[in-house]
Amino acid sequence: MITISLCMIVKNEHDVLKRCLESVMSAVDEIIIVDTGSDDDTVRIAEEFTNNIFYYNWCDDFSAARNFAFSKAKMSHCMWLDADDVLTDNSRAELIKLKAELDSDIDFVMMPYTTAFDKAGNGIFTFYRERIIKNSGKYLWKGAIHEAIEISGKVVYADITVEHRKIKEGEKGRNLRIFQKLIDSGEKLSPRDEFYYGRELYYNGMPDKAREVLQNFIDSKNGWIKNRIEAHRVLSLVFQELGKYSEAQDILLKALGLGEMSAELLCDIGESFMKLGNYTTAAFWYEAALRQTPDTTGGGFVNPDCYDYIPYIQLCVCYDRLKKYDLAEMYNQKAGRIKPYQNEYILNKRYFANRKNSKE
């Protein structure tokens, strides 16, 4: 059996902190809140749940703040959450069960983190994170932004999902500002940081600079392979924004040479052929996506829709363009069995019904 210190860093989280703490409080043995400069009711809300409230002068370094929070923990293991994270009733029950059964020598518990949802509330973007970490003092957060802990020792994967249910957007441009501050100070970015820096440049409407940084990262052949594949996918979006559709397709095809196949990448390739009007080849790639199995424990980003719904709905479009209407309708029906509430499926269903009626 282990004990858990929940360690959180917060700032101006009045709207979500109570929801988060209520969802997890019965599953942990200690709650530690580190406030980094709130000027709302965040601290007052935290006081309803714990006396372990500390203050930290924010220095644009998430790792430094998380390490400070972990340093205050007294239990055998530390768990982290952001204020807009929640555990469902089922996840909380599973966490309580895991805590009672887990050997005390486990160093890391990896848990799914779902950060995006469709309109029915189903997760559409999930990846595993180091969620519970042994409180040994040797595991430290690294990276001023997109912080992480290098995983080693005994690792357990637990199917206990944490949901990131944000209700407001974060500070616009914050991540890019922190990266730029590091660069201006003369710090050399790690390969991982270089990838995230390029992605932030794209997200913040700087496609030319994003292209340069992402291409340099790809050409260096450094960094984690999943980040390198993701860099190809983001660079493809950059090329599309620049109106370079052939280059966008080429960079996706080059990603296949890295040796890891994912439905996410294959769907991107299929879409690139659709945009060029090559529906036969697009259908080939979407069919290939349907044959993939998501690598849920590999640490990369997983969009479960790429393994069924997206290929189905896009194959419907491809075969409709190719005038293979029975095949197109079949794939729309398959999409509907996955997500009967999606507008694309509903509109397609109406379209096929109208086609049949017009022929009668």
Image (cartoon, rainbow, N blue to C red):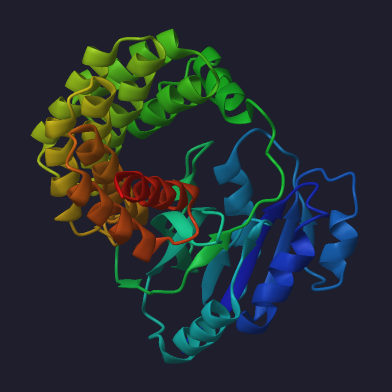
- From what the image shows, is residue 338 above or below residue 168? below
Q: Residue furthest front?
A: 360
- Quarter of the image for residue 265 reads top left
Q: Position of residue 127 (x, y in %)?
A: 39, 55
- Quarter of the image for residue 268 reads top left
Q: Position of residue 299 (x, y in %)?
A: 32, 54
Q: Residue at x 62, y 79 (%)?
A: 28
Judge whether residue 212 can be spotted in this image.
Answer: yes
- From what the image shows, is residue 227 above or below residue 277? below
Q: Residue at x 30, y 30 (%)?
A: 233
In terms of depth relative to the viewer, which is nearer, 34 or 39? 39
In terms of depth relative to the viewer, which is nearer, 175 or 284? 284
Q: How many marks?
A: 0
Q: Position of residue 241 (x, y in %)?
A: 41, 15
Is 82 on the left-hand or right-hand side of 51? left
Is 22 on the left-hand or right-hand side of 174? right
Q: Residue at x 14, y 55 (%)?
A: 291
Q: Position of residue 292 (x, y in %)?
A: 17, 55
Judge whether residue 223 can be spotted in this image.
Answer: no
- From what the image shows, is residue 37 above or below residue 82? above
Q: Residue at x 75, y 40 (%)?
A: 57
Is 102 on the left-hand or right-hand side of 70? left
In terms of depth relative to the viewer, which is nearer, 359 or 191? 359
- From what the image shows, is residue 105 above or below residue 239? below
